[in-house]
Amino acid sequence: MTASTDSPANGRCQSGFPVAATVIPRAEPAGEAVSCGLGVSLRACTARLPLRWDPGPPAKRRWIVEGGMAVSTPGAGIPIGVYRGRGCGISAIGVYENFIGREVQKVVDFMAEQPTSWAQFENGNLTRTADVSVWQNVLGQRQLALGVPACCGASAGSGGTTWADEASGVNDTHWEALGNRLIGLGLGGALLRIGREFNGNWYPWQVAEGGQASYIAGYSHVVTVLRGLPGAAFRFCWNPSLGAGNLTATGTESCYPGDGYVDEIGVDVYDWTQKNSAGKQVYPGNAAGTTTAQEQDVLDIMLTERDSLRGWYSLALNHGKPLSFPEWGLVLWKTGSSYLGGGDNAMFVRAMADFISGCSLFGWHAMWEDPWGAGVCDPDTKPGRPIPAPMSRAAFLQAFGS
């Protein structure tokens, strides 16, 4: 996609999105390329505008387009959330809010993926000792965005272990107990991410080719059970990870459970290496050796592969559902003995900021901020932090700080 010839005059690229609303604040001087609101390839779709960065006070940060048009920091008004550790408590959330200069709208947390008993599941255990009651009466206007496991019979020692089992209702009493627990704690309006990242192969509730019908039946049944509880006002985030994952033949969209069971579409996006057309991993396996060209190649794949960023945006628009990113972020850790990320990748952060700001039907987002130093809010000098991220931190604050 090429830039429209009238971009400098009207502030629009050929996609039709207003560039003024989607410019990514950067530290570079005037003349920096601005990608279109679709978040498509920074190489393929740019509208070069004469820009000058006016830092000003935090609330007034903006780009000035020479010729008179002012461009505000694009993401400062977009709902944002954060994860700072299981059951971290509201004080840890406050520290992050000081970091970005504004209050978050979502507090991200996760129930134990493999509870060792149904009692743990029903209690909403986040860890062996902490449970969802840590969020009782402290959230204010914030909403709990809770990752909830499914098909827990194997770890719990009895009950259903598959999505077909969930559809049959064998685990209904446990779901009802969990829902009533949340409602009783004043968390009946939580956003629930049931069986998140189901298209991957790392959770017990994963879905493989051929399992779509069982998954849809099981997921929709659980949603129906929870919605039917007295006092329930739960919202449901249908939450795959980026890409086709296990579902290479039909794509993850083949698991869409239907509009009646989805309040928003959430996609988890990380800066993992990708395979190029030759089947070779793009990133070199060490953060320091990653090049700008490699970062761009990975971004292009994320934007164009099956179940890509643009694909999910299109699906969300077609179904009239907000698109959210409950988890997105850098890959600053090893997987086993291998490093599979792009390191301190400010290009990725800027591209995500552009994409988020350009979505006409966007929900919220949360950069991954695991407190051992997996994100950008912790200092680069924090003991145990695997990879410093000063450039990504600056890009994130310029895009989403206030």
Image (tube, rainbow, N blue to C red):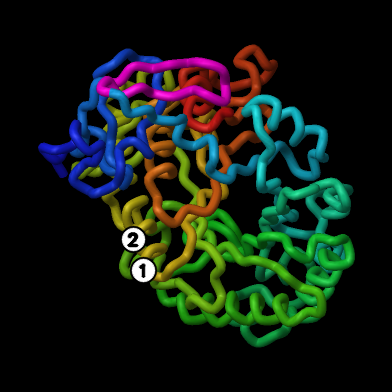
Magenta stretch containing residue 317, yes or no? no
Left or right for 193, reference 141: left
* Residue 297 visible, this angle: no
Query: How dense is the environment of label 1, judged by Cα within 10 Å: few (below 14), some, or many (20 and up)?
Result: few
Q: Quadrant of the N terminus?
A: top left
Q: Quadrant of the C terminus?
A: top right
Left or right for 170, reference 213: right
Query: Pointer 1: what residue?
Result: 318
- Decide: marks 1, 2 in contact (CB < 8 A)? yes
Q: CA distance from mark 1 to mark 2?
A: 6 Å
Q: Residue at horizontal 27%, vertical 49%?
A: 304
Q: Nearer the viewer, residue 219 or 154?
A: 219
Q: Please, what secondary structure does the residue beneath circle 2 have?
A: helix
Residue 353 in percent (x, y) is at 43, 37
Task: Give the farthest residue toward the bottom.
Answer: 168
Residue 175 in percent (x, y) is at 76, 74
Q: Nearer the viewer, residue 245 or 221?
A: 221
Residue 161 in percent (x, y) is at 66, 73
Bounds of the magenta span?
51-67
Query: Taking 288 as reference, is 18 above or below it?
Result: below
* Identity, as a three-letter code, of the amino acid under mark 1: Asn
* Identity, as a three-letter code, of the amino acid under mark 2: Ser
Query: Pointer 2: what residue?
Result: 314
Total marks shown come to 2
Q: Residue at horizontal 53%, vertical 60%?
A: 239
Q: Please, what secondary structure does the residue beneath circle 1 have?
A: helix
Q: Nearer the viewer, residue 29 or 247?
A: 29
